[in-house]
Amino acid sequence: MTKHRCGRVVCAVAGMLAMLAPLHVSAAQFPTDPAEAMRTYENVEPDEWEDGPVEYLFLRSERDIWNDLETDEQKRRFIRWFWERRDEDLRDDRNPFMEDFYTRVAEANRRFSGFPRAWKSDRGRVWCVLGRPGNIKQDVATELEIWTYHTYGGILQSVSAMGELQIAFVRADTATWMIYGGVGPGAWPPYVLQAIDIVNQALIANPELEFRK
């Protein structure tokens, strides 16, 4: 992408952001400590839980179940089941997957400012699911930030024949970056969505667990 073309992209993004109403949130909604992040996003009413960072982990089948629930008690049972599916050892009260996830959420809250902020940003979403990239490169000429994940024939092989996955973000303003695909800023490339779905599917440690209302 040429510098002239990228300049038009940035201007268009800035225009879209200017049309949005300011978002006023307290610092407590974006905790940078993992334990505090877990308390903040888990100790909420069931209807609020689904709107937290956990929304990035939902599988389609899980979303279908959730949308069919009617009571808070059913939703609380679903939440327990949701995390137990991702816990490799159900013999104790710890859930390392949940702990690791909220560590990534807290890191996203610390790293990414601008609008949308923290885990709600495009970079935050990728960070929360895929974790820290192997390499981050900013190209001043094109105003792109490229994240590279080295898959080495692992679970992302189907979306990366070259053994690595690259995700691009374009600068929207001084502190904000938006996902950038072939369609334009803010449009998620299908291969990135596929990568996120593949990872989320692979992280189900106990697929045999069934949810009962």
Image (tube, rainbow, N blue to C red):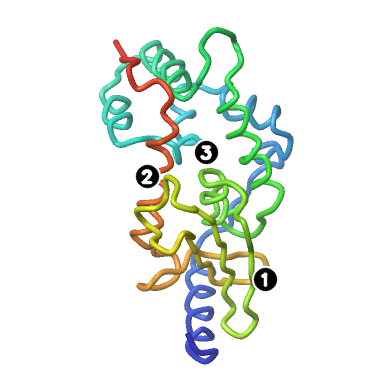
For marks 1 and 2, the one nearer the N-term is: 1
For marks 3 and 2, the one nearer the N-term is: 3
Helix or strand or loop: what does disc 3 sit on? helix
Q: Which residue is mark 3?
A: 53
Helix or strand or loop: what does disc 1 sit on? loop
- Residue 144 percent location from the top left of the image: 57, 74
Mark 3–mark 2 Cα distance, whole angstroms, equals 15 Å
Question: Is mark 3 in CB contact (under 8 Å) with mark 2?
Answer: no
Q: Is residue 83 above or below residue 105?
A: above
Mark 1–mark 2 Cα distance, whole angstroms, equals 30 Å
| Residue at (53, 78) in percent of width and height | 10
Question: Is mark 3 in CB contact (under 8 Å) with mark 1?
Answer: no
Mark in front: 3 vs 2? 2
- Residue 149 percent location from the top left of the image: 54, 56
Q: Residues within 10 Å of mark 3 (few under 14, many from 20)?
A: many
Q: Quadrant of the C terminus?
A: top left
Q: Amino acid at mark 2?
A: Asp
| Residue at (29, 28) in percent of width and height | 67
Q: Residues within 10 Å of mark 2 (few under 14, many from 20)?
A: some
Tell me the number on the disc at residue 197. 2
Q: Amino acid at mark 1?
A: Thr
Helix or strand or loop: what does disc 2 sit on? helix
Q: Residue furthest bottom?
A: 4
| Residue at (53, 67) in percent of width and height | 169
Mark 3–mark 1 Cα distance, whole angstroms, equals 24 Å
- Residue 75 percent location from the top left of the image: 39, 18
Q: Amino acid at mark 3?
A: Pro
Q: Which residue is mark 1?
A: 174
Q: Is residue 132 above or below residue 49?
A: below
Question: Is mark 1 in CB contact (under 8 Å) with mark 2?
Answer: no
| Residue at (58, 8) in percent of width and height | 92
